[in-house]
Amino acid sequence: MKRVGVIGQGYVGLALAMAAANAGHTVVGYDTNTDLVDALGHGISHIEDVENITLERLISSGKYLPTDDSLKLSGSEIVIIAVPTPLNKERLPDLNFLEAAVETIANVIKNEVLVINESTSYPGTLRKIISEKIYLKTNIKHRYASAPERIDPGNKNWNVTNTPRIISGFDDSTTKETKEFYLTFTKSVVTLSTPEAAEMSKLVENSFRQVNIAFVNEMAKIANVFGVNINEVLSAADTKPYGYMKFTPGAGVGGHCIPVDPLYLSYEAKRLGVNSTFIQRANEVNQSMPSYIVARILADNENDLSNKKIIIIGVTYKADVSDTRETPALQLINLLVKEKAKVVWHDPLVQKFNNQESQEIKDQDIAVVLTLHEVIDVDDIKRIKYVFDCTNKLNWAKSL
């Protein structure tokens, strides 16, 4: 078993750290967020337990140490980068967190180790940014591998232990070493020829979802013009046993992956002279959905939302998780406020959002169901006169 340092203890890093620690590795989970580290130190986790792996047990056994002290990474045999790679205000790749992780490794790790990048980025990130910058600062020839994360928050069927992993090192021996490490806690590992292929595979996975979600969102708009129920259409198409995969429309896309990863691919492709027209168009369609929803609500309410009391139900990007990253809720709220509506939100899983706290479902004129958590009482929603359901799960409400 190895001494492993994991940089970043968010959804990806913590799940990885806990799985590795449970397998018998000694894991140091480093994060610059002191509040997060303090919560982890008290056994408070922000992810669901996987196969009865509990944070308290791992900490008490000495197999897992959460810390905001980067020096605790010293002595690691494997260092894994699992930090966010978001977009900036211009919706271009923002590698600040990743570059900070590179600085940490260069400053702290003095012995040759296996460096694995799980953070999503465009092909060439491991070779041209991570390894080159570390070498320029340290003159140490670490071993490098790419293993793009595959975490789906809230998914009760697929997790870090049973989801197949894609990996590739700079050479065969590093690939083999990386594979052996992941196989200590992951059931299936697929090796590729280069880290660039591994990096691109992750971007293709989420670009596929972005494009297909945009397609059904566009189909929902077309179906509405024809007076056709899009759910009925999609369910009918889904009866075909081959050549079709069902996607469903919604208020847009959210989370760290679908609205972000494809733009990493299109950004680097454009820099190299290739336009990714499908990705760009899909992004435009999905970004347009909140505007379309507001237009539908306006049309159903005499084109006037002035002083209407509106409640957004569910502000996370998907059901039954507390993650609000890239949620369409913020854009939807801003657009409704521009129409002079009085907007509040309700979400039992979120403590604070948009500088507001969750409100009760009562006495509102309009409800917009953005995300339908299991804990939300549908009977409360039924009491509101006009309900627009972006999830298409409430057959009695207006829907996409």
Image: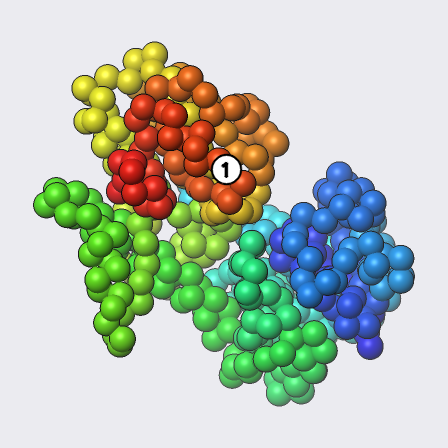
Q: Quadrant of the C terminus?
A: top left
Q: Is residue 332 above or below residue 229?
A: above
10 Å crowding of disc 1: few (<14), some (14-19), many (20+): some
Q: Is residue 102 visible?
A: no
- Left or right of 376 on screen, residue 308: left
Q: Quadrant of residue 205?
A: bottom left
Query: What is the three-letter code of the residue carrying label 1?
Result: Ile
Kindly state the secondary structure of the residue where label 1 is placed. loop
All told, the count of numbered labels is: 1
Q: Is residue 182 above or below residue 358?
A: below
Q: Quadrant of residue 168?
A: bottom right
Q: Quadrant of residue 13?
A: bottom right
Q: Residue at x 77, y 43 (%)?
A: 39
Judged from this view, the residue extending furthest toward the front is 379
Label 1, on which residue? 376
Please state which of residues 141 and 215 is positioned toward the viewer in this rendering: 215
Please state which of residues 33 and 173 is positioned toward the viewer in this rendering: 33
Q: Residue at x 40, y 19 (%)?
A: 364
Q: Position of residue 381 (x, y in %)?
A: 41, 30
Q: Position of residue 301 (x, y in %)?
A: 22, 22
Q: Is residue 163 above or below residue 99?
A: below
Q: Is residue 31 visible?
A: yes
Q: Position of residue 133 (x, y in %)?
A: 65, 62
Q: Position of residue 341 (x, y in %)?
A: 35, 17
- Left or right of 230 on screen, residue 386: right
Q: Quadrant of the N terminus?
A: bottom right
Q: Residue at x 20, y 44 (%)?
A: 221
Please state which of residues 25 and 145 is positioned toward the viewer in this rendering: 25
